[in-house]
Amino acid sequence: MVELLPPKELMSLGLNNKIEGYYMEENPRSLLIRLSDGRKFWVPKKFIDSEFLRKKNIKQEFIIENWILRKIGFI
C-alpha cells in the first residue's frame, strides 16, 4: 500500500518545489505556467500537488514535484 503525503510534508522532504507564476492555459493532461520573467512551460497536471485558480492575471504558487521540474529543464 502506498501512503500519500500532504504537500507540506513533501516540501519538508525536499521532493517538491514552490513555483510562483501565472495560469495561462491547460489541456486535459497539462497546465501551461508563465513565470514573472516571461518564461513559459508545460507541466503534467498529475505532478502539480496544489490547487490552482483558472484565472490568468493572478500570481499563484504551484507546488510541483522536483523530478518533473528537472525533466522539463526548469531546475
Image (tube, rainbow, N blue to C red):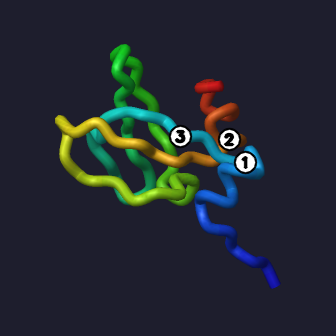
x and y, in percent, of residue 18 in the image: 53, 40
Which residue is depicted at the point 28% across and 43% down?
Answer: 25
12 above or below 9? above
- In the shown orientation, is residue 29 left or right of residue 58? right
Tag 1 and tag 2, C-beta contact below 8 Å: yes
The local secondary structure at tag 2 comes to helix
> Residue 45 vs residue 60: left or right?
right
Image coordinates of residue 59 in percent, x first then y, are 29, 36
User: The disc labelled 2 sits on which kind of residue?
Assistant: Asn
Q: What is the distance, in whole Å, between disc 1 and disc 3 at their CAs?
A: 11 Å
In this figure, which residue is indicated by the disc labeled 2? 66
Return the residue found at the far bottom.
Answer: 1
At label 3, which amino acid type do we have?
A: Lys
Q: Quadrant of residue 39?
A: top left
* Residue bearing mark 3: 18
Which quarter of the figure has residue 6? bottom right
Q: Secondary structure at mark 1?
A: loop
Measure the C-alpha gap from mark 2 to mark 3. 9 Å
Q: Residues within 10 Å of mark 3 (few under 14, many from 20)?
A: some
Q: Amino acid at mark 1?
A: Leu
Discs 2/3, front: 3
Q: Quadrant of the N terminus?
A: bottom right
Q: Residues within 10 Å of mark 1 (few under 14, many from 20)?
A: some
> Which residue is denoted by mark 1 in the rendering?
15
30 up-or-down from 23: above or below? below
What residue is shown at x 34% (from left), y 17% (from top)? 38
